[in-house]
Image (spheres, rainbow, N blue to C red):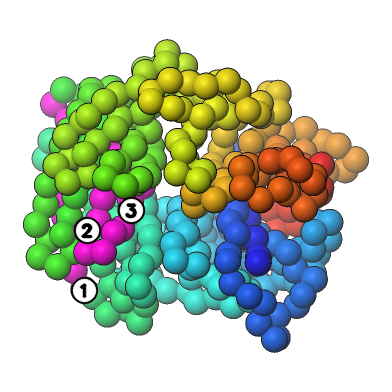
Amino acid sequence: MKKMIVVGLSLILGLIMAAVLLNYLLHKEKEDDFDRNIEYYIISSNMLDKSGALIGIDVNGDFVSKKEMKIQDVTKFNYNNNIFIAGGVRSNNNLIIKADGSYERFFLLDNPNYSGVTSINIQNEEIIAVMNGNVEGDTYQNLFVAQDINGKMIQKKIIDIYSSDLCYEDDTVYIVGSYLSVKNDTWSSKIIKIDKNNLELEEKIFDKNTEYRSMLISADKIYCLGISTKDQRGSIDILDKRTLERLDSLNYNSEISAIFTVNDSLYGVVNNEIREIKEGILLSSEYTLPENTYVSSYLGDNKSVHIYSRNDVIYEENGKAHMGYIIKYNMIIPSPFHQNRNFFSFILFATIINNIPHVSFAVFFIY
């Protein structure tokens, strides 16, 4: 089984800042021509130019392979049915990556000049995405797009949402994000449900000064992670999957930076602690993320979750930029690195070139 780590970079005020988008286990056997030394892949890309790479490393973080790619700002991703898909926010360049390291680049709407994506996913060889739009009238509008892997357009529709995440079940697409009222100068949490076949749409707007950052579907419920735009405190809204009605809202007066399930149990990262949430109650902390870090991104599939816990301040250590940690949480299968424990983590470094952390030489070390 292969693991995939996605690394994206942002170029801000001349400094490259790590925006690591997390890895994921690809549950697929190695192919005959696959280099059996590769344990992880890193996708690197910069914000302002098309200079990226697909880097293969072994379990110790040593380089095994590197494939140059003309990609930019690839920081949105999803993993579905053993396929990893990632897309650019500021540029319409997208990737589908397989466990053997092979990949396909594609453009939504078959045109690289269009804008990038705010969310993207794939199911049954159909790509679903929301493309970045702009303000029209009193709100922000994006473009919902469905196309096959060969580029053939299936559906498209303008929707009133700035999306952050989407899930796809059969012919129904669920999109979460925020709704802008220009007149009132407010953003509100919002969910949209779209029938992919006929584009019939249902939508619900909930709380002002809140945005939905991510979502997950479990049985007949949708769990939405909401973040206050005023103080960054988090809440978890539980919605009925069929009606989109809000069944409950869990507020702990705390920072909630991630929600995920492991073995059908709901978990959250609350004040940098991994805690199970049972019947709305926060149980005891099961793991505390490293000090002076925050959750930059995460990805799970009900079996385990990978969390990129990024340093508040990137600092130099032995000629490399110490950027943070990759942490895997798994209640089912003990980690091969720490037997009989539920966690393993990596220290994330980037080689410093001219005093700037350079993504294309990012290295992971076992910690």
Does 39 sit left or right of 100 as displayed? right
Q: Amino acid at mark 3?
A: Cys
Residues rendered magenta in the picture: 154-183
Instruction: Tell me the CA gap for discs 2 and 3.
Output: 9 Å
Judged from this view, the residue extending furthest toward the bottom is: 32
Mark 1 neighbour density, 10 Å: few (under 14) some (14–19) many (20 or more): some
Q: Please give the name of the residue rendered at 75% of the width and 68% of the height, measured from the top-left corner.
A: 38
Residue receiving disc 1? 154
Q: Which residue is mark 3?
A: 167
Residue 8: give x, y in percent of width and height. Answer: 58, 52
Q: Which residue is mark 2?
A: 172
The amino acid beneath tag 2 is Thr
Q: Secondary structure at mark 2?
A: strand
First in residue order: circle 2 vs circle 3: 3
| Mark nearer the N terminus (1 vs 2) | 1
Residue 30 part of the magenta segment: no
Q: Position of residue 254 (x, y in %)?
A: 47, 16
Q: Residue at x 57, y 46 (%)?
A: 305
Q: Is residue 234 above or below residue 306?
A: above
Residue 112 visible in the current orientation: yes
Is disc 1 placed on a helix, strand or loop?
A: strand
Amino acid found under the numbered disc labelled 1? Ile
Q: Which residue corresponds to the image point at 57% horizontal and 34% vertical from the top-left?
A: 295
The reply to whether dot 1 and dot 2 touch (C-beta < 8 Å) is no
